[in-house]
Image: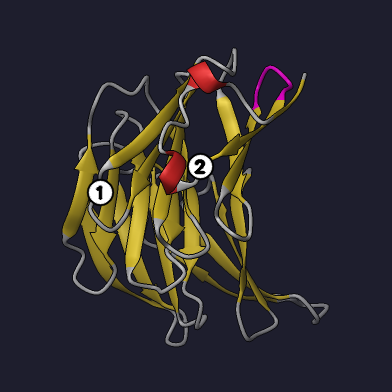
Amino acid sequence: MRVQCVRFVAGSQTIVSASEDKTIAVWEWEKSDSLITVLEGHDDCVRSIAVSSAGDRLFSGSQDRTLRFWDLTARLQTEEFVQSSAIWTVAISADDMKLAIGLENGAVKVLDIWTGETVFEDTEAYIKPVYSVEFSPDGKRLVAGSRGKILRLWDTENWARIGSIVGEHFMVVSSFAFSRNGQQVVSGGAEGTVRLWDVVPAQSDCNSSNGPVLSRD
């Protein structure tokens, strides 16, 4: 059984993990018999999970094409939303208002966390799948990375695309993270490189022609 994703639950001694066996496990890490419960409902591999900052809600995306909302206090599923393709990655904004997902078919979607309604969708020509999505710490930007060696960045206030970073990685963009101030993104590629990018909105030209601020091959 391969574990796909793990998360801490804020304000508790709890960890949640998503697995290939279609389940989400809830653990209390200080106990020797640490497994609290197993959340079941997905029909295929659970690829990604996100937890609200209050630690009371969990969101899961699966190969079965469903996005599911869970009440962690009651340990029950509360909502289910079927998508057009398998879900590879899930991320929650810092204000717990928006949920971003990256799909196997190359789409990026953002949903209202309370209604499940789609507030933004970009289906433009990613080389599928989208491996990762992430909000900046202040929630003002969203970045997505795909198999096509592409990072794309949006302004979450109007969903305008700020820029794209194309071709600086020679293989899959497998990981990335925002700096604390949200002004830089660091990206890691499957070819073994780590690159740092300026993504300040005022410099909304974070395209590959400008090159990375820092690069380690």
Read off the residue under disc 1.
159
Which label is found at residue 192? none
Amino acid type, residue under disc 1 in the picture: Trp
Q: Which residues are magenta?
A: 189-193
Residue at 57% from the left image edge and 17% from the top image edge: 168
Nearer to us: label 2 or label 1: 2
Read off the residue under disc 2.
199
In the shown orientation, is residue 125 left or right of residue 195?
left
- SS under mark 1: loop
- SS under mark 2: loop
In the shown orientation, is residue 76 left or right of residue 211?
left
Residue at 19% from the left image edge and 71% from the top image edge: 115
Q: Is residue 95 visible?
A: yes
Q: Position of residue 198 (x, y in %)?
A: 57, 39
The magenta stretch spans residue 191: yes
Residue at 27% from the left image edge and 21% from the top image edge: 125
